[in-house]
Image: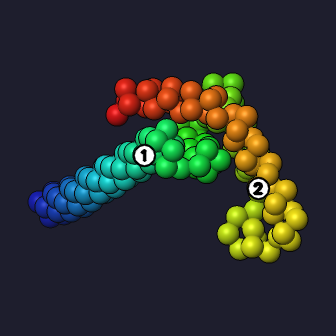
Amino acid sequence: MWYVLFGLGVLVVAGLAFYLGQILFQLRAQQRRQQQALLVHLQKQAEHQQYLLDSILLIGKATLEQQCELSEAALRIWVLLENLQPDLAQSSRWPGLFAMYDCVKAMPTHEARKELDKKELRRQDHLRQQTEIQLKESIETDIRGLLELLQQRH
């Protein structure tokens, strides 16, 4: 009788040990999948950050070479900068860029721009062009400083 109970006890312990082994195996597999997912996420995040950095550098260089309008550059660079590193996108740090961005950020683009009447379109274009003229040196100084800062990280 004791042998039967002892044998039954061994079977129960062996079954529980097997079950525990399966659970531990599943846990390790889940941890590996989570680690893999984290690595993939970090890789994609790094690629996105590099894309933002490269975009800012390209637009900045094109602007300094007069291949891109100041207002277009300010709008694009500011949005990219906010996404790349929000603490860099400070109006006090880049006053020229921010002033130009602030001027054009609410101006309609694409289809909305086409729907404006000609008088309003000319008014907005005049405002944008006058602001570009006033801020040209400040914007170019800001872009040079930003490019220098970002190239150190690149």
Residue ID at (86%, 71%): 117
Colour scheme of the rendered structure: rainbow
Name the residue nearer the viewer: 144 or 28: 144
Q: Quadrant of the C terminus?
A: top left
Query: Distance of mark 2 from mark 1, alpha carbons?
Result: 25 Å
The answer to which image quadrant residue 1 occupies is bottom left
Q: Where is residue 92 in the image (x, y as percent from the top left)?
A: 69, 25
Q: Position of residue 56 (x, y in %)?
A: 47, 43
Q: Can residue 88 be seen in this view?
A: no
Q: In this view, does 131 lie above or below 94?
A: below
Name the residue nearer the viewer: 125 or 52: 125
At numbered mark 1, what does the secondary structure look like: helix, strand or loop? helix
Residue ID at (56%, 32%): 140
Amino acid type shown at disc 1: Leu
Q: Can residue 152 be seen in this view?
A: yes
- Which residue carries the number 1 mark? 58
**Which disc number belongs to residue 125?**
2
At numbered mark 2, what does the secondary structure look like: helix, strand or loop? helix
Amino acid type shown at disc 2: Asp
In the displayed structure image, the side of residue 47 where residue 124 appears, left or right: right
Mark positioned earlier in the residue sequence (2 or 1): 1
